[in-house]
Structures are given as structure tokens and as C-alpha cells.
Amino acid sequence: MSQSDKDEPSNLPLERQDLAPSKAEAEEQADFEDQVELTLLADLGLGGSRTVEPDGAGVSRQPRYDLLGTVGEGAMGEILLARDHELRRKVAFKKIHSEMAANHGVLQRFLTEAQITAQLDHPNIVPIYGLEVSPLGDVGYSMKLIQGKTFKQLIQETRAQLDQDGRTDEGHTQRALIEHFLKVCDAMYYAHNKGVIHRDLKPANIMVGPYNEVYVMDWGIAKIIHAHEAEVSSEVVEMIRSDAQEPPLERTQMGKIMGTPRYMSPQQAAGRNDLLDGRSDQFALGLILFELITLKPAFKAKDQLDLLKRVLKAELEPMTPYLAGRQVATELQAIVAKATAKKVDGRYAGVAELADDLRRYLRGEAVLAKPDNARQKLLRWIGHHRELTLGLVLLLALLGGGGVIASLVQQQQAMRRAQEHEQKLSRFLMQVGKRAQVIDARFMLFESLLERLAGSSEQVLEYGQPSTQPVFTHLDFYDPARKPPDLAPAPSYGVDLSLDYLTFKLSPGVVRDQAEPLMRQLAPLRHVFRQIALRSHSPEAAALPKAEADKLLRQEGVPLIWAFIGLESGMLINYPANTGYKPEYDARLRPWYTASLKQLGPRWQSPYIDTSGKGFVLPCTLPLWDSQQRFLGVAAVEITLDYIKQNFLTISEQTGFVAAYLIDGQGRVVVSSREQSASFAVGTLVNQARELETYGRPEVVSQLRAQASGYLEYREGTQRRVLAYYPLRSLGWSYLVEAATADLDIKPAS
């Protein structure tokens, strides 16, 4: 960003590199970080405190949420509709029953659910916003409000449509249901890679939103893979209420056997909790897939004991279609059979392999669970190449003798080339989809970090008191007697920076003496800024010793290169701390500020020129409001377009790669791997964003605007090209990749 609109580069000498903070500063930093990072745990009785007092203000904080009414009930608590005062949005609030909160075992399980879910940053896992406690001591956590239907409801609706008309609408076709299921697989593949298993996957715990977004819900009995788990006490089992609205065989069980009987793996049913891994969840996914295909449960039994016996033997019902006279594809039967094999070694190696096989089926390819024989290969090829097959038949009718043999050889070669092309295209589409999911997850992380900065800033602005910490305007950096003690070169930025403090740039007309109390009130936010910068790199970076963290920030850099706040009162607060701002610099005139005045929630804006010489940057902004809904300013984080090009757009392992793009919801190119790195002089001050151009192939722009996924094969000059596009749900954008068809890799992925 905003590092700066600079008159000249900073050439201040290095005096105290890797300077450790004083004891007082270290204690103050620890105290403040406890409030920002651990206060919510303390509120819940784990930190010995039940009040939040930002920066020692001693002022009772207004409850962040208005609880508007119950929308559902779970085993440990109820789910309420709530209004978030700070971000002006409606959220879901899961509140533990008060009598359960008094039991340490139940409370710990409730907290574990929140902590595990919050650490799984994936587009298809419900986002957790924070732990909270009400003035009355009610413990709960806020999460994204999902207004949609569960898989269970979708299955019921599909059955009803078939019963009435013998057919379904587009949203309830088998293909649509499988597409939803694939998103669940993507979420579970991510969770398993993070070392977490769900243990209670079932249609009632998966939701589909109004825009076909899919969320895996209710991680209440999730478990760290291979971690020892103490057996749940009988007292806790008795206290936790099972989901009474569900049939007995579909209620979550607690105790030695954990999970829902109808959707357990044999290993779960045997109580082998410490030995479970992702293949146990895979079994449950296979059962859910069975139900999506047949619209009937995979296990039927007269009671729970009978059901557990069937589960232990993996004795599924036959996969018969819901309507008589129809068939279940043998490929789907094979996929379900492999995912629900009794022994774990008989299942897919992981959920990703299950999803890949399903995608092969949807593309009309042979599946690994049931490879084609020679006859099936021929029939499948004919099905994919009807025009070519018709041409062959006509050719055979016209030609004879040696001509026929020669033609058959040529056609056989054409068949092989077509099969190779399909294999290459399939792997290319899979690569694009996987990369899009990575991009989506990373941008969701960046948004969550911005929300954390905004929430902390609003609290300190409204309830904080001036501190005794040192503060620095951008002019102090030029004064050896007043500059930050840790000011030193930062090769990753190309300028001198302070990593321990913030920069305050006052707008023209704002006097320092008058602004000083507010600057001191905001100074403790430096710890929040630093944590956000480090967490944008990785969770591990935030836990590094100070010297190592400083080295990372200075030498290597982090994705969120700048984090800052612009206040309506005429002040910029920037991290890392820097100088070089021109006298006329006013945060309120910058593109990231002016574009944010009417928005609700975090939003990625158009790129603009960074005044500190880092080229074009992409800002994500969020307006700040006080408890009376008065506008305070804008919080923002930024990432350079160069970082996006180098780390997100290019697929290094994909041969034939030509170009990649991030395209906004209007079909305009936000950033392209084709564009050259832009270089602007330090101090360049352009108070408007870059004009975005519509993507150059009109035939796919409408699909991009509709947030669809797909591909297009075309010619560019004499070359055959293919492009694939995939929606980025968190952004409302799309990821698009162009490749040269002839150069696509045909080797199986290692």
C-alpha cells in the first residue's frame, strides 16, 4: 500500500538490528496479546477472567451480538440467529446450554469443536468467527449463517419430485447431487491433510446454500488423527443431548462408540477410536454417496443392535434405483463398493482418489474402481466420438481390400490420439480445479485476518485509553533522536522499516499535539498488526521467536505486505512502520478508502499503484463502525500483484501452460500472468484504481459472470488451445488458465 508516498528513499543507518524489546515492553506486549488472542478463552472460564478490557480501559464492553431467536438445536446447545454489531451482519451463534457449561468435560468438548473448525480454513467448511460470552455468562461461538438445505432435505425433495412427476428439476438431478458431494470430498481431503477426521459425516450435517455453496457442519466429535482420546465419561454422555429430532438410528452417539450408527465405518462401530484415519470418514462418504444415488439409506435395520451388526460386516443394501425400470450405473456401484470396503486397505488411498474417480465418471471415462475391458473401451470410445464412428462405418461401406486395412490402421491411430487427448484434458482440468481451491482458501484466510484487525481496531477505538507506549509519525523516522529503535533495512521491501511499531501519517490540517492521545490509544494494536502479517505466511510463523520472525519479515517477506487503517478523522496507521509520505498524502483520498465507503463486509478492490514502489497492489478493505453505527474509517490489507502471479496463478507442474488470470464477477481481468511487473518511482501518488478490461474471449465471459466452471477448446492462429475456468466462491471471481493443447502433459501425475 500505502507504505508510502515518498519524497525520497529512506537512507537511515542501521543502529540496533534485532534489538530485543525491553522487559516492560515484553510484558506489555504479552498482556495485550493475551487480550486480543486469548480473551475469548478467558471469557469462557479457561483464563480466569470473564470481562474484556481492551488496553486496560476498564470499560465494560457492549455485547457484540444481539441474539434474535433459535433456528436449531444440537447435542450440546442451541443455534441462534444473531446480529453482529461490529460488522453489521447476521451470523449464527451456537450457544452451549448453561447447565452443560458448568461441566468441564462438556465445555472442553464444545471448545474443541470450535477450535478445530476455526482452524480448518476451507471454502466448504463452515467458517467460525470467534468465541464469545454474553453478559449473563452464556458461552458460545459465532459462525457463518448458512441459509440453505441439508443433504437430507435435498434427498427428501428429490424423492418427492420423482414420486410426483417421475423426474426432477435441474437442482435435484443425480449429477447435481454428485457435484455437491464432490465439494464435500474436497473439504474432507483438506481436513484429513490437516490431521483431522470428522467422525459424524451424514446428510443432516452437510448444507447447500442458495448459490450452491456446500458446507460441512457439526464438527462436535471431530478428532486429531492418531491422537489418544480419553473415553467420554458417563456423566458427559448423559448430559449431552442427542439430536432428538432425528430418527434413533441417525442420532449422534457418544461414549466408547462415537458417531451416528447409520453412517459409521466398521472400525468406528468397533470402538477403535485411536486407530481411525481419513478412510473411516471415506466409508461414511461412501454411504452418503449411496444415498444420493439411490435416495435410500445404505443400511436398514430393525434396531440399533441389528444395525451395528450390519455395519461391522459392511453389509450394505443392494444399490437399486429409487424408481423401478431405471438402472444405477455400474461405475457408481463400483465407486461406492470401493469406498465402503469392510477393510480399510480395500478402500481408496484417500478421499481425493474417491473424488477423482467420481469426476472420471462424470466425464464419461473409465473409473479406477472398475476398469473397462476391451469391449467396454470400444463402446466408450464410440460414445465419445459418434461422428468419427459414423465416418468409419461409411468408409468401410465404400472401401474394400487393402484400402480397408489401411483405413482401419489410420482410424485406430486416430482413436489412440483421441484417447490421449481426453486423458491430457482430464488431468489439466483437475489441476486447474485443485489450484482454484488453494487460491480460494488462501484469500479466505486473508479476509479472516482483515476481520480480526477490524474487530480489534473497533474495540480499541471505542473502549481503549491512551497508553504510555512510544508512537512515531512518518517524520520521526528522519530524526535520529526520535526514530523507532528497531528501524533497519528490509530487503524484502527495499526500504527501512520498523517491525515493532506503527507509522502514523496525519492528513493535512491535523495537528500532532491534538492527535497524540488517539495515537497512544491505538499504539497497542501494533501486536495485532504483527500477528496478522506473520499469520498470512503460516500459523507456524506467528509462533516463531522474535528474531526469527523479524528475519522472515525483513528478508523473505509475507503475503500481506501491508496492513493499515485509515480514519475519517484524518489519520493513517500503517504496518510495517515506514516513512516517506508526501505532505499532501491523505488516507481518505486513496482508492482503497474511497471505494469502501458504501460496502458491507470485506471486499477485494481493484488494483492500484503502491506509493512505496512495490508496483500494483490488490487491497481487501472493511469499513469500521462504532457501537452506534457511526463510520470510523477503513481497515485494509494488501498483496502485490507480483506475489499473486508468482504464487497463485502459474501451475509450474503443468506443461503447456500459456497464461492464467484472476477474473472478477463482471468478467474483467484483475491480474494476469502475462502482464509484466510494473515499476513506479517511490512517491508516485495516483488516487485512483486501475481500469480493468473484460477478458478477451466473449464466448466464456457469460460463464465467468455466472460463476460457472468449464472449459473451451479453440484455435489461436495455427495452434490448438484449451482454457479452463473455475469459480472462486469466497471472492465471487474466477480462476482461468490457458494452455497449448499439443504440449499438455500426458503422464499420470506422480
Image: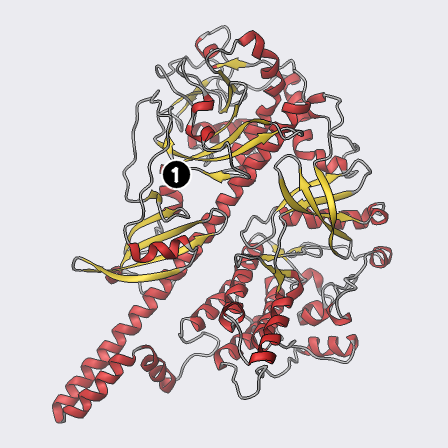
Judge by depth and name the residue closer to the eye, 260 or 517: 517
Q: Is residue 473 left or right of residue 463?
A: left
Residue drawn at x 75%, y 35% as measured from the top left: 42
Judge by depth and name the residue closer to the eye, 234 or 582: 582
Quarter of the image that includes the N terminus:
top left
Q: Give SS at disc 1.
A: helix
Residue 605 appears at what percent x and percent y?
43, 37
Name above or below for residue 104 compared with residue 533: below
The residue indicated by pointer 1 is 643
Residue drawn at x 77%, y 43% as measured from the top left: 139
The residue sitting at the bottom extreme is: 401
Q: What residue type is labelled 1?
A: Tyr
Within 10 Å of disc 1 (Cα), the crowding (few <14, some 14-19, many 20+) is some
Image quadrant of residue 243?
bottom right
Name above or below for residue 674 compared with residue 499: below
Residue drawn at x 44%, y 74% as measured from the top left: 367
- Inspect this view and state whether residue 653 appears: no
Image quadrant of residue 493?
top left
Residue 175 appears at what percent x and percent y?
49, 71
